[in-house]
Image (tube, coloured by chain):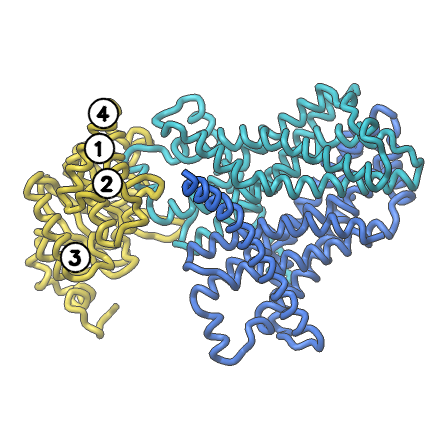
Amino acid sequence: MIRCASLSLTLSHRPVLHELSWDLAAGSVWGIIGPPASGKSVLVKTLCGLFTPQRGTLHVDGVEMTRLPEPARVDVRRKMGMLFQNNALFDFLRVWENVAFPLARQDPELSREELAARAGERLRAVGLAGSEEKWPSELSGGMKKRVGIARATICNAPVLIYDEPTAGLDPVTTSKIYDLLTDLRTRHASTVIAISSDIPALRRFVENVLFLHQGRVLYRGPEAGLEACEDPVVYQFIRGLGEGPL
Amino acid sequence: MAGRVATSFGNLFAAVGAPVLALCAEVGGILTLLFRVLWCLVPPRFDLDETWRNLHKMGVKSVPIIVLTAFFTGGIMVIQAAVFVKKFGATSLVGWGAGYAVFREVGPMLLGLMFSGRVGSNNTAELGTMVVTEQIDGLRALSIDPVRYLLVPRVLSMIVMLFLLTILGDVVAILGAALFGTVLADVSLASFWVSFSQNVHVADVVHGLIKAAVFGFIVALTSCHFGITVKGGAVGVGRAVNNAVVAAALGIVLSDYLLTYALP
Amino acid sequence: MIGNFFASIGAFVLGLVEAFFAGLSIAGRTFRGVFHPRGRARGEVLHQMYQIGNRSLLFVTVTLGALGMVLVFQVCLQINKITGDQSQVGPEFIRGMVHAFVPILTAMMLATRVGAGIAAELGSMTVTEQVDALRMTGVDPVDYLIVPRFLASMMMTVVLGVYATVIVVLAGALMAHTAFDVNYAVFFVFEKVTWGDLGVGLTKLVVHGGAIPIVSGYCGLSTTGGSEGVGTATTRAVINSSLTVIILDFVISAIGLMTVQSGV
């Protein structure tokens, strides 16, 4: 589904991604973990074509992205739904308008009523029935995440990307969000990429893991193999040890 | 029915009253700050090192922008003078017109606005961030008076700096006016100089420089006031910066109005 | 310290050149967006016009009113010293306002008020990833965010400029009448204003009005580094759009002087 080969990216004279190669099969579920500022968010944004890497290639569903001009990338982005780290809810739109926004862009023929109906249905699916007419600023952190998830999934895109779906949420809400994500995955069989700092919860959700440190891949493979990884950074990080190279 | 009319009247009063009250609160805050600053000046009790650091930082930051602004302001003024005198053929008036306008009004005003945008807004953001990150409370906890340690040095630096920058700006603006007068309006350097030196008096320069010092004071007070009263985290800092530049612009224009009468 | 100073000038010039080209690219994309509207929200231009007008009406009234009085005062003072003939003050003042002072002063005030607002708004949208979210759904941020503000600001600057001219002339007449005994009938003479003056004044208003959202929108969209970044973007927007207005004003004045205003 997504295949990147020796991607390198520099942002304002600072190298962020370094010779990164990664291959995602359609329908697989990946988690990205790593210390803060290791390039996790930049990596998933690069996959959507929001950043242009200086070197390397990136194929999404067979289309080479890195040399495409901005307008042509839109067709590739339609295949992806993304939940942003800060939710990125449009504060000038109501909740249902936020959820319906990608749908309205994809299919301009849809009437306002149809959009509202589809958005309402999606909001019920994430457990937010009745919040359609609220503004994003009136929602709690967990509710904002849910709205973000509803917006990311409304187009039934084949690739779903969740950047920190549970950051700043309490344990109960966290487990509810992961239940929701698991439910969505079984229903639509999409390829899923999730970034999280909550490693135990993330590992229960994903099949494969990519460990990123300073823009380099330290581990890439099945979640179960993470324990056996001998890299000192990975060893320290997944066990949460105080002593080590970090 | 009567009840509804009454509420709509109530709403009207609330809509008018709330901004007026907010305005009064801001003006009151600025005046309080003014007295607290003056209190620290007689006899002088403030941090000299911090004053020197601020002078240096503000100067380095604003010299390029002031030079550019002044250069083009000189150009704009000489063109206006040229449009005016062309029909009389009185090119001997150009140097006088440009010099008079730049020294007394346009120079201090535009340089003051640019200074407010560059140094004033930066100051608000800096103080606001210190409030939001509780650094001001930290100073208080060490029993250091933030007014004496942070505000008075900034106020003094801004007054002195805008005064000095206006002198520099005046010189650059006149050079710009002379240059563009020759290029665009066929006014020779010699006739520009004769008209300028015979008709523009020291009093005009002094008039403008006093204004500059007062504008510096106003920029300093507004930017410090909005900086130290920041509420509501980082979003509040952005709002404070916005309010500070607008308040400074209002203050500059209104005090210009008063000073024009008061000064010779 | 001296090296530091030159380094800061060098950095300033480099930043200026970089910003200039980035601004040009945004301007190009904005113009393209104006002529090929793609999925702009309905009523967005009207909404933005309301925002701009609502934000600046009172501000423009107060500042331009005070400035009108000051300028008339300065001119009359000078004329009293030389000839004492006040009959030409009104007509020449009105002419100078139309083609020179109102466009630049209104635009400077709007650069402060509107420019800072646009940069703060787009800056916080950038740091909260709303701009990325727009791009994800195939919306060009320039098309969606800057084009409506560009069109709205261009129209509202012209409207506010015309309104400001009325305010300035009324305030000036009031001042001339009360302080220098100039008859209203002698003051309100509009015959001196040529079509060329009107054209130059309107061109300036349109160009300045278009430049402010492009420059400040660029500052907003290029925000980096969290919420402190928004403060920096706001201050950059104020200073860059003011400077852009001054330079554009100079260029248009020079072109006007050499073409439509040359024969008069």
State which tag comes first along the sequence, 4 or 2.
4
Question: Rounded to the nearest whole Å, what is the CA distance between mark 3 and mark 1?
Answer: 26 Å
Determine the CA span between mark 2 and mark 3. Answer: 20 Å
Q: Nearer the viewer, mark 4 or mark 1?
A: 1
The residue lying at 20 percent from left, 52 percent from top is A165
**Disc 4 marks which residue?**
A110
Q: Position of residue C41 (x, y in %)?
A: 36, 29
**Does B188 appear above or below A84?**
above
Q: Which mark is residue A132?
A: 2
For badge 2, the amino acid type reads: Glu
Residue type at numbered disc 3: Thr
**Residue on which disc 3 sits:** A173
Q: Earlier in the sequence, mark 4 or mark 1?
A: 4
Quick one: C73 or A47, which is closer to the camera?
C73
> Of label 3 and label 4, which has the lower sequence position?
4
Between A87 and C28, the one lying in front of the other is A87
Where residue C99 sits: x, y (%)?
70, 29
